[in-house]
Image (cartoon, rainbow, N blue to C red):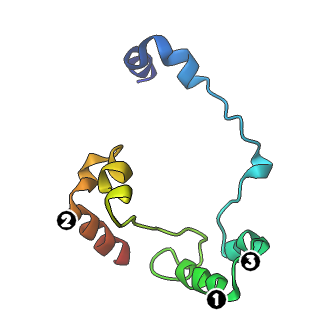
Amino acid sequence: MSEKIIRLLGDEAEELLDFKAKVSKEGLHLPGPDFVDRVVSGTDRTPSTMWNMQLMFNMERLAGTGYLSVLPVDQDIEHSAGASFTPNPAYLDPGNIVKQGILNRL
């Protein structure tokens, strides 16, 4: 399998497979049930914003995990779906966005 991957990657195989992130692990904010208290509380957010964020983090299937699933919504021309979903063209279809939202609620 690895030989097939190397062949598919071609000339860039070594560079891609040996990549080391240049971000220190100290700069990462890992998810957890205390994410809002640990990470967001140090910002200038209002108490009501903090409360609402905590509510969002405690909803649905991901409740209490520190993970939050957010679906982008097209707001106007300057925030068009073309700009948001170009890397994933399947989600240019509004029906797929609705389906994803329904799946996240199950």
**Residue at x 55%, y 24% (from the top left corner):** 17
**Residue 1 sits in which quadrant?**
top left
**Residue at x 73%, y 68% (from the top left corner):** 39
- Place of residue 38 in the rendered image (x, y in percent of width and height, measured from the top left): 76, 72
Q: Mark 3 packing: few (<14 Cα in 10 Å), some, or many (20+)?
A: few
For the residue labelled by badge 3, is the local secondary structure a helix, a strand or a loop? helix
Amino acid type, mark 3: Asp
**Residue 3 sits in which quadrant?**
top left
For the residue labelled by badge 2, is the local secondary structure a helix, a strand or a loop? helix
Q: Mark 1 packing: few (<14 Cα in 10 Å), some, or many (20+)?
A: few
Q: Earlier in the sequence, mark 3 or mark 1?
A: 3
**Residue at x 66%, y 69% (from the top left corner):** 32
Q: Which mark is residue 37?
A: 3
- Place of residue 65 in the rendered image (x, y in percent of width and height, measured from the top left): 59, 72
Q: CA distance from mark 3 to mark 2?
A: 36 Å
Q: Is residue 78 above or below residue 105?
A: above
Q: Which mark is residue 95?
A: 2
**Residue 44 sits in which quadrant?**
bottom right
Q: CA distance from mark 1 to mark 2?
A: 33 Å
For the residue labelled by badge 1, is the local secondary structure a helix, a strand or a loop? helix
Amino acid type, mark 2: Gly
Q: Is residue 6 above or below residue 37?
A: above
Residue at the disc numbered 1: 48
